[in-house]
Image (cartoon, coloured by chain):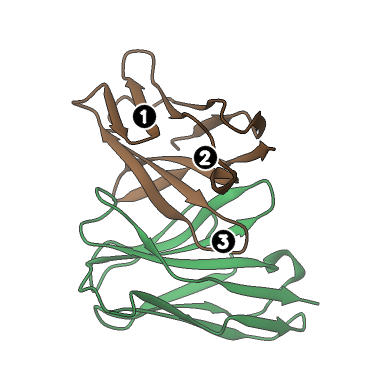
Chain colours: A brown, B green
């Protein structure tokens, strides 16, 4: 079945610096790519998504880029803040369901 | 709107016991999903229901059964619990399959001893 590879599994950045998380996939038919954030003890929540007809999308400090030819998409968080500490999941849509990556634990260091 | 609700929040079972996890949504969504979350494994799909009246297996269906009782409710049953089923279980719903945002419930933490 379709797999989504997510890297890195853990990421530590200084407060104010940028963080980048990357995901790769194999099925070129996938056309919807959401990112979810899960704070400790909470449920996952959508933070941004991108569709295959768009190469980049921004929402304040968060941006997602998609390279369909290379089959990878990335999450960029700029000017990181303590509240950005969480687990981030990339995902893609395939056959009526969302397939998730294994997650990246982001630590924001003071 | 309550969104997606799950009961119970916590549960401890002995090996071999059975139980049903309940999920309900009040957003008139067509699709509903059950995931399990284990450390380092992300969210793995157990079963899903793309629309009322249909259910399909996901990535890890063994040991589970589901019922889409109506458009609002989607339950997950463990017939004979095993320690390997110790996990956090999330229910989710979305309006049109997986093409738009999935809304998650608060989760059920299940321990099987």
Q: Chain of mark 3?
A: B
Q: Mark 2 sits on what residue?
A: A101
Who comes first in sequence, dot 1 or dot 2?
1
The answer to whether marks 3 and 2 mark residues whose Cβ atoms lie closer than 8 Å is no
A54 and A79: which one is in front? A79
Residue A71 position within the rendered picture, expressed as x and y whole percent measured from the top left: 38, 20
Q: Mark 1 sits on what residue?
A: A64
Q: Mark 3 sits on what residue?
A: B36
Decide if residue B78 is on the left or right side of residue A48. Answer: right
Q: Chain of mark 2?
A: A
Tag nearer the camera, 1 or 3: 1
Quarter holding the N terminus of chain A?
A: top left
Helix, strand, or loop for circle 3?
A: strand
Marks 1 and 3 share the same chain: no
Q: Chain of mark 1?
A: A
Helix, strand, or loop for circle 2?
A: loop
Query: Dot 2: few (<14), some (14–19), or many (≥20) neighbours within 10 Å?
Result: many
């Amino acid at each position: 079945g379709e797999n989504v590879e997510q890297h890195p599994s853990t990421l530590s950045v200084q407060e104010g610096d940028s963080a980048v998380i990357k995901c790769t996939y194999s099925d070129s038919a996938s056309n919807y790519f959401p990112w979810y954030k899960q704070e400790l003890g909470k449920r996952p929540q959508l933070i941004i998504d991108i569709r295959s007809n768009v190469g980049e999308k921004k929402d304040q400090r968060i941006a997602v880029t998609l390279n369909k030819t290379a089959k990878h998409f990335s999450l960029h968080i700029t000017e990181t803040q303590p509240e950005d500490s969480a687990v981030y999941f990339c995902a893609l849509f395939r056959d009526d369901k969302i397939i998730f990556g294994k997650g990246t634990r982001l630590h924001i260091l003071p | 709107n309550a969104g997606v609700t799950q009961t119970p929040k916590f549960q401890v079972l002995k090996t071999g016991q059975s139980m049903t996890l309940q999920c309900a949504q009040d957003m008139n969504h067509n699709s509903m999903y059950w995931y399990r979350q284990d450390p380092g494994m992300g969210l793995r799909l157990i079963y899903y229901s793309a629309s009322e009246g249909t259910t399909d297996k996901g990535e890890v269906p063994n040991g589970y059964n589901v019922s889409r009782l109506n458009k609002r409710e989607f339950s997950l049953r463990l017939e004979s619990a095993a320690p390997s089923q110790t996990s956090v279980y999330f229910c989710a719903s979305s309006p049109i399959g997986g093409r738009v945002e999935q809304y998650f419930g608060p989760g059920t933490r299940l321990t099987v001893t």
